[in-house]
């Protein structure tokens, strides 16, 4: 739909007749111009013939997916001992000690859709694009990408109408939609977690300032209040301005086109009503100005994006989010951890002890960043008096397991938060070769997204 302000020209019958033969037609009124869909009556002859919300008084459940690249060093990642509550955190997970009681460390989850099969190289692209979809991707570096719908978007389709934003997509890496990034696979596979359809990734926002302004508006807190009041006072339907022109246009249409126009105008009004509902929803106004932009320091960038995620959940602006911490195959260096070699290069350590130690140090650095975020979530009280973390499900992990061998079984997966008591936490869970998508189905159930029978390569619900 195209809406623009313009000066309406004087009526010219000859010009109108010429316009009637155009594939683009407009309704005009009071300086408003609105595009119409293609209609038989005005096309040349050659073109013819061809969810559930939270209960009253209860806090809503939130769900976020955080993805890290290149797998881990398994020996440093997994806790020692048997499954259950009596487990010791591994060296990599030690920074999470303060919120251990809200964790599930789950061993035995697989993403076998990322296996090579006959496609050969490209494990990073496959691990990135199948992580939330469980659907094998098409090997192409062109525009004909094909993956699957990600679990966050499926849940957003069910319950996204309950908040101002159905979902929130963020990244701490570059935005790339095209090009060859991994052995003949498009960059779109590595740099997008969320997929609205098999061919349409949802581009994440890497700039924390733009995320903030999307959620709360631009300017200082007082200015945001004035801007919202001004928008609400000036709100009108575009259809109010074009009613006269619509009636004249319908008189020239055949029955099919009148039905098509009615459906189109109805859809326009439904979109307007959704926007109006969103504007009327309480908009939190954090007592802070928007961040300045993308910091030069990776850790600072990540913490700002975590803060945006926390604010979005705290204000119930959305209940579903994805945050790509780095694209699969990332070769970022970590001066913050004293490491000058690239992460991806080091992950192919060939069992050299010095390189293994460096990758383990990078894994540790990532969990240190995660711990800061989860501790803030734990310290933030929700509307029911529980912590925001308790009422959430924050999944952290990678589509690669052992980065040296590019394995996709026994994925390093943590779920922090119990989903408002739905999950038992403070435990180490071991399952036997269960699709990661089974866990996603169970998480979707806890979000109130009823009716999802399967997802990707799922074989049932996650039970442990």
Image: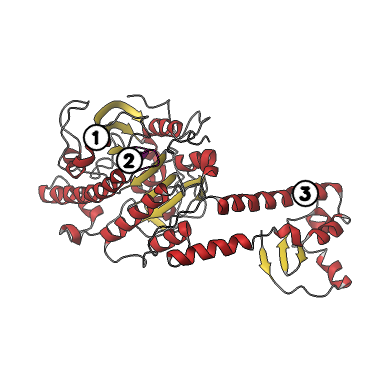
Q: Residue at x 41, y 26 (%)?
A: 461
Q: Earlier in the sequence, mark 2 or mark 3?
A: 3
| Residue under label 1 | 101
Q: Earlier in the sequence, mark 1 or mark 3?
A: 1
Vertical position of residue 411 compared to residue 342: above or below: above
Vertical position of residue 403 compared to residue 249: above or below: above
Q: Which of label 1 and label 3 is nearer to you?
A: 1
| Relative side of 462 to 154, left or right | left
Instruction: Find out whether residue 403 is within the magenta segment.
Output: no
Identify which residue, 129 or 306, lies in the foreground: 306
Identify which residue, 268 or 434, lies in the foreground: 268
Quarter containing the C terminus: top left
Q: Quadrant of residue 72?
A: top left
* First to last magenta residue range: 382-393
| Residue under label 3 | 262
Q: Residue at x 54, y 50 (%)?
A: 281
Q: Label the magenta part by its dominant secondary structure.
A: loop
| Residue under label 2 | 387
Q: Which mark is residue 304?
A: none
**Where does the image place residue 205, in percent across and percent down from the top left?**
43, 58
Q: Secondary structure at mark 2?
A: loop
Contact between labelled residues 1 and 2, with CB atoms less than 8 Å apart: no
**Where does the image place residue 192, in percent across and percent down from the top left?**
42, 51
Q: Secondary structure at mark 3?
A: helix
Instruction: Find out whether residue 388 is within the magenta segment.
Output: yes
């Amino acid at each position: 739909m195209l809406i623009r302000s313009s000066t309406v020209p004087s009526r010219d019958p000859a010009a109108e007749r010429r316009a009637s033969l155009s594939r683009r037609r407009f309704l005009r009124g009071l300086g408003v111009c609105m595009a119409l869909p293609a209609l038989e009556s005005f096309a040349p002859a050659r073109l013819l013939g061809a969810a559930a919300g939270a209960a009253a008084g209860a806090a809503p459940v939130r769900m976020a997916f955080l993805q890290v690249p290149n797998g881990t060093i398994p020996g440093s990642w997994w806790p020692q001992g048997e499954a259950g509550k009596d487990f010791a955190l591994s060296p990599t997970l030690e920074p999470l000690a303060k919120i251990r009681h809200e964790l599930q460390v789950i061993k035995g989850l697989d993403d076998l859709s990322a296996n090579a099969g006959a496609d050969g190289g490209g494990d990073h692209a496959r691990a990135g694009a199948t992580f939330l979809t469980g659907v094998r991707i098409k090997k192409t570096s062109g525009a004909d990408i094909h993956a699957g719908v990600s679990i966050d978007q499926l849940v957003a389709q069910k319950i996204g109408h309950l908040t101002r934003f159905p979902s929130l997509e963020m990244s701490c890496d570059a935005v790339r939609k095209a090009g060859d990034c991994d052995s003949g696979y498009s960059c779109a596979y590595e740099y997008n977690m969320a997929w609205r359809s098999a061919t349409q990734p949802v581009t994440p926002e890497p700039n924390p300032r733009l995320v903030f302004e999307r959620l709360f508006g631009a300017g200082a807190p007082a200015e945001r209040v004035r801007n919202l009041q001004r928008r609400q006072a000036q709100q009108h339907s575009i259809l109010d301005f074009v009613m006269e022109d619509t009636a004249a246009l319908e008189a020239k249409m055949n029955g099919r086109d009148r039905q098509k126009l009615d459906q189109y105008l109805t859809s326009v009004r439904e979109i307007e009503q959704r926007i109006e509902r969103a504007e009327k929803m309480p908009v939190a106004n954090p007592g802070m100005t928007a961040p300045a932009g993308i910091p030069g320091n990776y850790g600072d960038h990540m913490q700002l994006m975590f803060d945006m995620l926390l604010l979005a959940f705290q204000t119930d602006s959305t209940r579903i989010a994805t945050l790509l911490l780095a694209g699969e195959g990332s070769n970022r260096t970590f001066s913050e951890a004293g490491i000058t070699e690239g992460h991806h290069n080091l992950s192919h350590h060939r069992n050299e002890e010095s390189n293994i130690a460096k990758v383990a140090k990078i894994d540790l650095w990532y969990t240190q960043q995660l711990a800061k975020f989860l501790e803030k979530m734990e310290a933030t009280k929700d509307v029911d008096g529980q912590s925001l973390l308790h009422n959430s499900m924050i999944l952290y992990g990678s589509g690669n397991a052992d980065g040296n061998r590019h394995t996709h079984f026994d994925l390093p997966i943590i779920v922090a938060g119990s989903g408002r008591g739905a999950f038992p936490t403070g435990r180490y869970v071991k399952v036997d070769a269960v699709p990661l998508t089974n866990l996603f189905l169970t998480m979707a159930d806890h979000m109130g997204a009823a009716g999802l029978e399967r997802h990707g390569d799922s074989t049932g619900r996650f039970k442990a």
